[in-house]
Image (tube, helix red, strand yellow):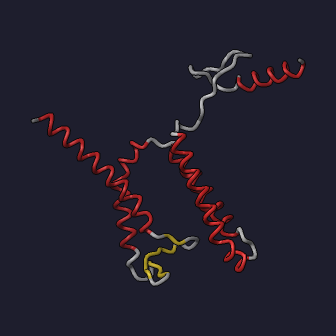
Amino acid sequence: PQRARTRKRIYSTRLSYFMNEKNERPAQGKRVKLKSRLPEMDRGFLMLILLILLLGMIILTSASSVVAWQRFADPYFYVKHQLEFGIALGLVAMFLFARIDYHKWRSYAVPAMILTIGLLIVVLIPGVGFSYGGSNSWINFGIFFFQPAELAKLTFILYLASWLTNQDRYKQVSELEA
């Protein structure tokens, strides 16, 4: 009984530091429903992403364990590398970008497309573009190499979505005028 009262008192005290719906501290001993700091997510879609990641890791383990053992004496070298630099960074980026309202991306579509086209042209300048594997499609920034074609894929999708949204607006306006 004493432990239960102590736990309840600690729980109530901890909750008193959180704000309630009116952005004020609750009275001592009152319980408040905590809101998640993450935006509402489609749990089914999130589970599908995690399932695909898990299957990919299983396939990577199966396909690369022998080569990893021969080269690095560690059968899970590529799996660890993928977990560290692929999945961990990707999930962090996913959760960060999920917090941004997708309507704000529309205003960045044209500048991002112009920047990307500029980077694609910079690759063609001798001395700036770096050749790897017979393809002159990399930029050397000193501490890392960057391939603008990967950025072009994302910015083209962003630009196309913005453009199609604007086309739909113009169509609705012209229908109202008619």
Residue at position x 71%, y 22% from top? Answer: 16
Residue at position x 90%, y 19% from top? Answer: 2
Residue at position x 43%, y 63% from top? Answer: 151
Residue at position x 20%, y 38% from top? Answer: 172
Above or below: residue 65 compared with residue 48: below
- In the rendered structure, the answer to whether residue 58 lies left or right of residue 174 reads right
The location of residue 83, given as percent across then percent down, is 65, 60
The location of residue 138, given as percent across then percent down, is 47, 75
The location of residue 51, given as percent across then percent down, is 58, 51
Above or below: residue 65 compared with residue 21: below
Front residue (pair 70, 59)? 59
- In the rendered structure, the answer to whether residue 66 lies left or right of residue 148 reads right
Quarter of the image containing the C terminus?
A: top left
Looking at the image, the residue that sits furthest to the left is: 178
Number of dots carrying numbers? 0
Quarter of the image containing the N terminus?
A: top right
The location of residue 125, given as percent across then percent down, is 38, 79
Res 112 quadrant in image? bottom left
Front residue (pair 157, 15)? 157
Res 17 quadrant in image? top right
Above or below: residue 153 compared with residue 75: above
Front residue (pair 139, 159)? 159
Above or below: residue 140 compared with residue 159: below
Looking at the image, the residue that sits furthest to the right is: 2
Front residue (pair 6, 119)? 6
- In the rendered structure, the answer to whether residue 65 lies left or right of residue 109 reads right
